[in-house]
Each structure stands twice: as C-alpha cells, then as structure tokens.
Image: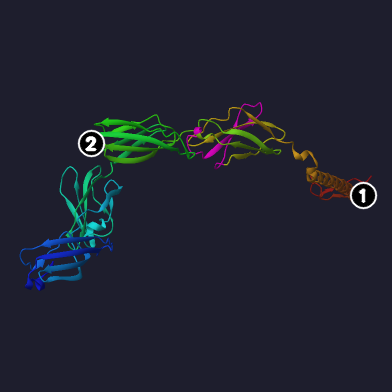
Amino acid sequence: MINLSNYVENGIYRIMTNVTWLRFLHCNNGLGSSNVTDQTYDVNPMNLSITGLVPNSEYNMTVVVSNALGSRTESFSNQTQPAAPSAPPQDIVAVNQTLFTITISWQPVDCAHQNGNITGYEIRYRKKDGGNTEAMSDIMGAHYTLTDLQPSTAYLIQVAANNTAGRGVFGNISASTLFEVHVISTTSTSINISWAEVDYEVLITWISTLSSHCTQNIDQSLKNDSVNGKSSYVIDGLKVFTEYNITLCINGSICTFKTVVTNATAPSAPPKGMSWEGSSSTNITIKWDPVPCADRNGNITSYVVMFRENGKEMFHNETTTGVDMEFTITGLAPSTEYEIKVAAFTVAVGPFTNESFFASTTADTREGGSNVGGVVASVIVSVLFFIGATLGIIAAIWLMRRKKSTMKGLFSIGHFKVTRKQSTLPHSRDTQDISLEQL
C-alpha cells in the first residue's frame, strides 16, 4: 500500500509503478524479478495498492506520478508480511515400520511456499478405514515416530508446516504397521507359520538367501502362494539348514517379513581325501578334507574316527574335539596294519568314508639300541643275585664249623655229663642234661 496524499493537490491522472522483488526474508533466496504497472485514474486516489506480491519478501519500488503540471518520481524499499505456508512439506515417506510403530520423515516446504520462518510441524493420523483422528503439534525436526498403533493396520498420516502466520497445507501418505507372523515349528525341509486371521487375501512369498552352514549364496528362486480365510501355512520342499526370507502381504498392501532357518540334520556324505601323516610304534596320525558344503546339512562340531586291526571284526571309536581335520590314534600295537574310517558330526553322525583307509604302526623301538637301560638293569640284578648266593654259602660253612667245635669241648669233661645248649639255628630245642655211664 503506497500513500499518495502528497500528490492529490494538483490532481493525479496517471501513476506508473516499477516493483522489483529482491529476496525472501525467510530463506535468503533472491530472484530479482520485476513488475511494471501503468494505471489511469479519473479521480484523485489517496492510496495505491500493489497486489500479487510474495509474502515475507523484500521489494524495491519506484513510483512515477503524473498530472497536468508534470511528473514526480520516488523510490523506496518495502517488505511484505508473512503468510501461512502455501504448500505441504516435501517427500513425506514412512521410513520404518514395526508391529506397533510407524516412523515418517519429510523434507521442508519449498522456499517459495514457506511464506515465513517455519516454527514447527503438525501431524494428524487415523486408521485408514475410519476412526478418531489423533494430532501432534510443535514437532521440531524432519521425522517423527507414531507409537501405540495396532498391528496389521493401515493409517492415513498428514503433515503440515507452521510459521508465525499459521498452519500451512497438509500433505498425505498411507502407511501400515507390520503383520505379525509366528513360527510354529520347523523341520529340516519345512517351516510352519501362523498369523491373526483376517478377511483379506494373504500372499506368502519365500526365497532362500544362503546356506547357513557354509555361508555361500545358493539358488534364489522366488516362490509364492495365495491363501484366503486361513491363519496358518506350511512351506515345504525346502533345503536343509538354509536361511529363508518370508514375506506376507494382506490385501496387497500390508506386508511383514520373517527370516527363518530350517533345521540341521546329519551330514549326507563323508569327509573326503583321507591321508596318512605319519606313525610311530603305537600311534598313527591321519588327515582329511571337509565334507562338501551341499552335504553338510548343519554346522560340523566334531568328527568320529573308527579303526581296527586289519582282519579283525571289532572297530574302536574315537571322537575328536573341535573341528580340526587331523587326529592321532594312540595306544596301538607295534608293526600292525589298521583299517581306519572317518565321519562328520552335526546334530548326528553322518556316513563313514566309503573306501577303507589302511595305515601301519612301526616296529617296537625296544628291539634296538634304544633299550640300553633295560639291558644294564638286567646285568645288575644278575650280579647282585650271584653275590647274595655266595654270601649264603659262606655263612652256612661258618655255622657248621662252630657247632662241631662246641660239641667237642663238652665231651672232654670227666663226668660224662652232656649239656645240649640252645641252638641259634632254626628248629632249635631247649637245653637238656643227659647222664651217660662211664665207658
């Protein structure tokens, strides 16, 4: 609005205005456009209104007022007032959904439509099929999470920007909470799932992502089935111990996802490439290559080694600890050939190697020079035995001679009294007095 009261004294019959737009005051974005108007009046106006300007903007204005006496020019700058935003926020999307929440994000209102400094945002939402509308205001930032929602439900969500002049235009999107799916059971080749019963068509899609026991990509053929009026489904014909991504969609719009792994079983093939790494008189060390990935059917946790003397009926078993593919069989007989087989273990023992593997222990090292200590010990025992026997013989001779000398001394007494003393030898008797007649 331009005041023309200073010009009405001599009459005004023509006014020319040149208006140049400089910039938005709220986002500092100048375009420099201009607008020229030429207006003719039959009466003397008191004010001149220039319309079609942009809110919250700065302008340069030039006014030329003409009458019968001539013209007068005046230039000045002016600002328009803010107005409520004239467009909604841009790019409103749902960026994350759970069973009970929906997170949305957006970009600011285009600068040309902000019409003032944005002070916050307002969100409204309700169930898509009707119901009460909930509202949140004074939201700062460019994202927000709606909570306490119902699973498997579609919502209509609106977002508008606010500035000092008021609330702007709402933008709308539809988004749904996730569809709750339960895994009832799994086998090695099937997955049984269930969900809350609904009155819509349920589309089930599944795809294998990777083999869980050897982390390599496998055939990712997408399969699907459509069911109506059911609340459970068995997906069968699956691969053993394999991860599957399962998607359920209600009425083509509300979808949820589930990742499930089928059960492990025993390996369906034995280890490959057994080799003999060395042996001693009582030990044999063997190695082998892994079970092929497609035949493992689970995570291998250990191996079972089965062995027996060649030609004998009974096998002996040893279980390894860990997943090392090398094992030493101990406690074997020297110079003996053994038949050896190996199997892998996951949740059960798989098949043993088809072809028998034979390996032998070496000869007993005690037959060679390494048994010097045993020979020396035998010699020492023999010498000690000889010495003990010799000393025994000497002691026996000494005792016999001592006994004979004692008897001779007793019989030399005149009264023929014979006293027999207690002997120190085994089986000795008590002392006795014997009376003899004189010879």
Mark 1 against mark 2, which lies toward the viewer? 2
Q: Quadrant of residue 21?
A: bottom left
Secondary structure, mark 2, is loop
**Is 171 placed left or right of 42 in the picture?**
right
Secondary structure, mark 1, is helix
From this view, report whether residue 307 is shown above or below residue 150: above
Question: Is residue 313 covered in magenta?
Answer: yes
Tell me where the magenta segment starts and ends, as one range: 294-323
* Residue at image point 29% right, 37% down: 249
* Nearer the observer, 409 or 252: 252
Question: Is residue 399 covered in magenta?
Answer: no
Q: Position of residue 215 (x, y in %)?
A: 48, 40
Sequence-first disc among 1 and 2: 2
| Residue 408 - label | 1
* Nearer the observer, 203 or 413: 203
Say which residue label 2 marks.
Answer: 198
Q: How many marks?
A: 2
Q: Amino acid at mark 1?
A: Lys
* Label 1 CA crowd tier, 10 Å (few <14, some 14–19, many 20+): few
Q: Position of residue 182 (x, y in %)?
A: 31, 39
